């Protein structure tokens, strides 16, 4: 049995991709399941979806903790979330030979059987994860913007998955996309997604990444019943778990959600404050001295409303670059 | 004195770092409403998108006291909070309930109606994104005719919601409360001045704000403001204000461009000419009604025109 985790952001289509992958496996007469991680996630927030593929019946119904493969739909997530976590479970125990199921061709000779499929403009050897694993990389955001017009990288990453792991053929992936996307989004959109998957398959580079990247363990405030304040009333406070209580969301770096960021032209700005009003995230600040506005990129989610409402076109949206 | 954008404070009362979707209309509305209301407020939020994106316990985006309990009791909870404040002698504190359209039109309607009937001294704000967005787009009473949601999908027999939008502002006007208004995130000055007026009024104040939802409505995330402008232009949203029974229409719709408005959104993409004609007819009827209602109430309650 192969277990696959999709890491993505709400809106990139991780759930749909997991379903399409399961459907593709079923087209190859395999058994498969796909399910999302349920939570209160919003569009843009980190989300996960899961898929299992096996030759026989799948009896496990739990979340996946030790994936064989991870697919990362977003270029920034691999730097924020330890996506390779749990993959050490697949490290060979005798002389680097993996235990358990069949090895894929691409990963042959590797001491780890699993693979990470990443959406990044970098080459595999330029990627650094917590573990040294086989990596397939493709600039899926660019492909998605070209073929779909918006950064839904799910279909493209399925193509990259087929290339990296050879678990399922690109032909089955295409069928799976037509099946799942076609039903949900209509045939026209499904066809564009098939195109994205093909391009993803063609442009994927496979190699080894470097390991050893450290992800600081996040301490979570998990009080037991006795430690909870009466009525769950909590004051604004700084603790070893970070800020708690009123105003504590200021520590959330929502800026990592974006694909495009706004650039303000101070010369053109007439200080009408429309962008300042219309920014849902409060990341536009007024600069009275310059009679212009500034952008707080720590919070900017890149929605582009500021650029749309600007009456003098002083704000342009620029694609985010990895670096 | 009419508020201008430059009169609003720079400091956020609803902090950044909240987890609303990029381009969220509700976040846009609430940030600015909070700025007008100032710091001496208590916020109550029932289950809604806002209750999630303003931070789940122990995280919180509000820098003012924030209270969250269950879905159906916004009206009851803000009544209690407001009376407690009065009892403590804190007359300067405004109690504000902010609910979504589901928590207002369906689940919270009885508590809302009770609080309005008792004329409790509170502000009730409904941000209207026209479905239960928090749980993944289910139809609510405020979902417009024809909109596709997960519970009113496009199928062979029916396409989208068959019923028409529940007119909550009108229900609130029927309660004869001191102040009822509708606003939109796309009309900043109209919105902030209505909030200011609500703040300065005593008694029960109801404000319903049009707040587009990117994933629920299926449009490009940068188009939130444009969509709001189109909605008012085509008559899918009216900017109204009812003070002590006297209704004033703040902006006359052109009643055109309905199709442009619909085609911008995934939830209306399936609509054919017949359905669009049906919708057009219903909003025209609504508009005629409001025009007549405004004339009638101005005659009945007299006085000068309500100014914004």
Image (tube, helix red, strand yellow):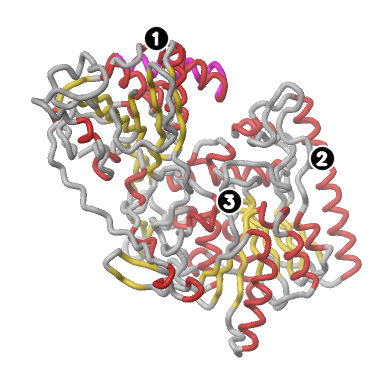
Residue B26's x, y, as percent? Answer: 55, 53
Visible residue check, residue B10: no
**A103 relative position to B213: left or right:** left
Magenta segment, which residues?
A185-201
Q: Are marks 3 and 1 on the same chain?
A: no
Image quadrant assignment for residue A7: top left
Q: Is A276 placed above or below A187 here? A: below
Q: To which residue does mark 3 refer?
A: B186
Q: Residue A194 magenta-drawn?
A: yes
Residue A163's x, y, as percent? Answer: 28, 16
Q: Residue B138 magenta-drawn?
A: no
Residue B72's x, y, as percent? Answer: 68, 60
Q: Are marks 2 and 3 on the same chain?
A: yes
Where is the N terminus of chain A found, in terms of image quarters? top left
Residue nearest the observer in this picture, A262 or B103 = B103
Q: Identify the secondary structure beneath mark 1.
A: helix
Q: What is the distance, in whole Å, between disc 1 and disc 2 at their CAs?
A: 49 Å
Please, which chain is the residue tagged with disc 1 on?
A
The crowding category of the residue bearing disc 1, from other C-alpha atoms within 10 Å (few below 14, some 14 to 19, many at least 20), is some
Image quadrant assignment for residue B292: bottom right
Residue B156's x, y, as percent? Answer: 73, 21
Q: How many numbered markers are drawn?
A: 3
**B26 relative position to A295: left or right:** right
- Name the residue at 44% across, 52% down: B19
Q: To which residue does mark 1 refer?
A: A171
Q: Identify the secondary structure beneath mark 2.
A: helix
Q: Identify the secondary structure beneath mark 3.
A: loop
Q: To which residue does mark 2 refer?
A: B282
């Amino acid at each position: 049995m192969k277990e696959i985790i999709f890491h993505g952001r709400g809106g990139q289509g991780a759930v749909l991709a997991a379903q399409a992958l399961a459907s593709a496996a079923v087209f190859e007469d395999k058994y498969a399941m796909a399910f999302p991680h349920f939570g209160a996630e919003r569009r843009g927030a980190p989300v996960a979806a899961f898929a299992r593929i096996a030759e026989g019946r799948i009896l496990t119904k739990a979340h996946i903790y030790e994936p064989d493969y991870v697919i990362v739909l977003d270029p920034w997530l691999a730097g924020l979330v330890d996506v390779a976590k749990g993959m050490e479970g697949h490290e060979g125990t005798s002389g680097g030979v993996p235990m358990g199921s069949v090895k894929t061709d691409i990963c042959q000779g590797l001491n780890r059987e699993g693979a990470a499929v990443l959406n990044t403009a970098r080459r595999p050897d330029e990627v650094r994860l917590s573990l040294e694993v086989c990596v397939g990389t493709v600039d899926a955001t660019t492909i998605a913007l070209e073929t779909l017009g918006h950064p839904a990288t799910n279909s493209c990453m399925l193509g990259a998955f087929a290339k990296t792991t050879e678990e399922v053929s690109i032909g089955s992936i295409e069928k799976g996309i037509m099946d799942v996307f076609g039903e949900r989004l209509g045939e026209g959109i499904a066809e564009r997604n098939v195109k994205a998957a093909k391009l993803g398959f063609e442009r994927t580079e496979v190699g080894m990444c470097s390991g050893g990247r450290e992800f600081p363990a996040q301490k979570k405030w998990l009080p037991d019943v006795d430690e909870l304040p009466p009525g769950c009333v909590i004051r604004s406070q700084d603790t070893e778990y970070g800020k708690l209580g009123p105003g504590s969301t200021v520590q959330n770096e929502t800026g990592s959600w974006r694909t495009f960021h706004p650039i303000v032209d101070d010369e053109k700005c007439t200080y009408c404050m429309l962008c300042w009003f219309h920014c849902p995230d409060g990341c536009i600040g007024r600069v009275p001295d310059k009679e212009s506005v500034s952008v707080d990129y720590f919070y900017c989610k890149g929605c582009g409303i500021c650029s749309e409402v600007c009456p003098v076109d002083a704000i342009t949206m620029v694609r985010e670059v990895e670096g | 004195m009419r508020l201008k954008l430059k009169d609003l404070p720079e400091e956020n009362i609803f902090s950044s770092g909240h987890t609303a979707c990029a381009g969220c209309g509700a976040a846009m509305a609430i940030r600015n409403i909070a700025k007008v209301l100032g710091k001496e407020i208590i916020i109550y939020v029932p289950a809604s998108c806002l209750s999630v994106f303003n931070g789940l316990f122990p995280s919180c985006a509000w820098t003012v006291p924030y209270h969250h309990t269950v879905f159906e009791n916004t009206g009851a909870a803000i009544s209690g909070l407001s009376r407690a404040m009065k009892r403590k002698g804190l007359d300067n504190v405004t109690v504000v309930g902010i609910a979504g359209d589901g928590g207002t039109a369906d689940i919270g309607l009885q508590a809302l109606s009770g609080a309005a009937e008792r004329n409790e001294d509170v502000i009730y704000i409904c941000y209207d994104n026209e479905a239960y967005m928090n749980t993944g787009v289910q139809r609510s009473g405020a979902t417009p005719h024809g909109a596709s949601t997960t519970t009113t999908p496009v199928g062979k027999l029916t396409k989208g919601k068959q019923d028409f939008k529940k007119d909550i502002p009108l229900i609130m006007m029927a309660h004869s409360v001191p102040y009822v208004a509708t606003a939109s995130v796309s009309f900043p000055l109209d919105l902030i001045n209505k909030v200011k007026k609500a703040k300065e009024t005593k008694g029960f104040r109801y404000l319903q704000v049009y707040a587009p939802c990117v994933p629920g409505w299926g449009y490009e995330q940068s188009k939130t403001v444009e969509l709001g402008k189109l909605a008012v232009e085509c008559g899918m949203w009216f900017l109204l204000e009812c003070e002590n029974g006297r209704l004033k229409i703040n902006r006359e719709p052109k009643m055109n461009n309905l199709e442009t408005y619909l085609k911008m959104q995934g939830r209306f993409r399936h609509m054919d000419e017949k359905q669009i004609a049906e919708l057009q007819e219903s909003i025209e009827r609504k508009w005629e009604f409001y025009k007549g209602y405004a004339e009638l109430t101005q005659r009945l309650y007299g006085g000068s025109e309500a100014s914004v």
